[in-house]
Image (tube, rainbow, N blue to C red):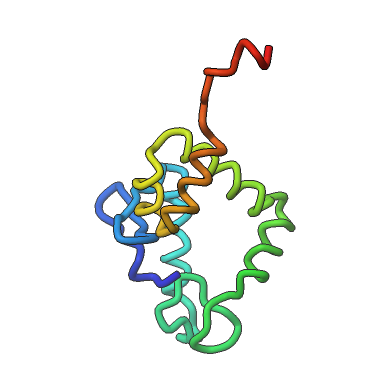
């Protein structure tokens, strides 16, 4: 993720994961702002535009590096990601989800199918 994907305006922070910028919730606003400020104070000057610069100059942090740091503080990214996709798929139409997150229409449709709240067979399940 590049730092130019983050836009801070007044009290809001927007992050662009795909084509559409998403406003971050208030709790994330402060975290993103703090991170951008600390990143800008790096004496190494080796971030090359990465939001999360890695140890190798001009390269971002690896996925495994970020994942292991999150797990160390008790956050399980894979389970959290699945739960979030499930919740989003239950709340917004699949084409909107696909465009918003930059995933394929088929993938978004599969999440929507998993999250469907179909009560047609409620009596038989009961």
Position of residue 14 in the picture relative to residue 41 (left or right): left
- Residue 84, visible in the rendered structure: yes
Please say if 93 is above or below 98.
above
The number of callouts visible is 0
Please say if 23 is above or below 7.
above
Q: Residue at x 39, y 37 (%)?
A: 92
Q: Quadrant of the N terminus?
A: bottom left
Instruction: Tell me the quarter of the picture where residue 62 sits.
Output: bottom right
Q: Residue at x 60, y 47 (%)?
A: 82
Identity of the residue furthest to the left in this view: 10
Q: Give whichever of 22, 8 is nearer the camera.
A: 22
Please say if 113 is above or below 78.
above
Q: Give whichever of 82, 125 is nearer the camera.
A: 125
Percent across and percent down for residue 23 are 34, 48
Q: Give whichever of 109, 56 is nearer the camera.
A: 109
Percent across and percent down for residue 96 are 34, 46
- Residue 33, visible in the rendered structure: no
Q: Residue at x 54, y 35 (%)?
A: 115
Position of residue 21 in the picture relative to residue 74 (left or right): left
Percent across and percent down for residue 89 are 47, 40
Q: Residue at x 53, y 78 (%)?
A: 60
Instruction: Tell me the quarter of the picture where residue 7 sits.
Output: bottom left
Q: Quadrant of the C terminus?
A: top right
Percent across and percent down for residue 120 are 53, 18
């Amino acid at each position: 993720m590049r730092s130019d994907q983050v836009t801070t305006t007044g009290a809001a922070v927007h992050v662009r994961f795909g084509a559409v910028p998403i406003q971050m919730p208030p709790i994330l606003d402060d975290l993103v702002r703090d991170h951008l400020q600390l990143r800008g104070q790096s004496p190494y000057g080796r971030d090359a535009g990465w939001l999360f610069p890695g140890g190798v100059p001009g390269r971002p942090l690896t996925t495994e590096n970020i994942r292991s740091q999150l797990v160390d503080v008790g956050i399980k990214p894979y389970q959290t990601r699945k739960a979030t996709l499930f919740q989003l798929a239950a709340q917004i139409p699949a084409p909107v989800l696909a465009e918003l997150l930059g995933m394929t229409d088929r993938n978004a449709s599969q999440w929507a199918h998993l999250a469907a709240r179909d009560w047609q067979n409620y009596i038989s399940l009961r």
